[in-house]
Image (spheres, grey):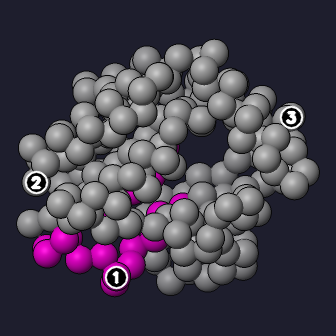
Amino acid sequence: MGKLFYIMGKSASGKDTLYEDLLSRKELGLRPFIMYTTRPIRANETDGVQYHFVTEEVLRRMEADGKVIELRSYDTVQGIWYYFTADSSAVDMRNYSYLALGTLVSYQKVRDYYGADRVVPLYIEVEDRLRLERSMKREGKQAVPDYSEMCRRFLADQEDFSEEHIRRAGITKRFQNNEDREICMDELAAYIRSQI
């Protein structure tokens, strides 16, 4: 039986980089579990790789068809963006293990959908000052940097990933990604191997 390893953490905690590295480690045998969003695609993102980038109309059709497992909306300075997980026939957890990226709330809903014995949390932590520096650097690479939205995300994460919320979600293991990313990647890979 396969498992779904679920990476989560505050914005700019290095989740995307860790996700890509873990998928590239062939010995882990992980497949990507791709989620959906209506937000605009960022520089260096590819549809179907980081997310399935869809319109709100496509989201509503999928909801009507009963395919949406969980749905979150964020009222950004650019309008409402939706992020969601959909049930897909492409996911075969009888034979394969998957790697997903999401939030604490999405993790809980996906865990409840697939079962706590099959969804393994990988919670990434980074010191706030370093996260803010990384956020500024990433936003500065956008064609039209939106520092207001970056600040909104940073502050929203303080509440979304509060210690109370982490405890209620049953997260007990944490992975530090402060300075040496390679150490964090190796710790994640070793933990995944121990769970398969």
Q: Are marks 1 and 2 in contact (CB under 8 Å)?
A: no
Between 25 and 107, the one nearer to me in the picture? 25
Dot 1 or dot 3: first in sequence order is 1
Instruction: Pick out the residue farthest to the right.
Output: 144
Mark 3, residue position: 148
Q: Is residue 99 left or right of residue 150?
A: left
Could you tell me which secondary element the residue under label 1 belongs to? loop
The residue at the point 23 percent across, 77 percent down is 92
The residue at the point 63 percent across, 15 percent down is 129
Mark 2, residue position: 196
Dot 1 or dot 2: first in sequence order is 1
Q: Is 41 drawn above or below residue 126 in the view shown?
A: below
Mark 2 residue crowding within 10 angstroms, few (<14) / some (14–19) / many (20+)? few
Choose mark 1 or mark 2, whichever is in front.
2
The amino acid on which the numbered mark 1 sits, given as a three-letter code, is Ala
The stretch of residues the image draws in magenta is: 84-106
The amino acid on which the numbered mark 3 sits, given as a three-letter code, is Ser
The residue at the point 59 percent across, 36 percent down is 11
Look at the image and tell me in which quarter the N terminus lies: bottom left
Q: Is 77 drawn above or below residue 56 in the view shown?
A: above
* Position in image of residue 53 (x %, y %): 65, 71
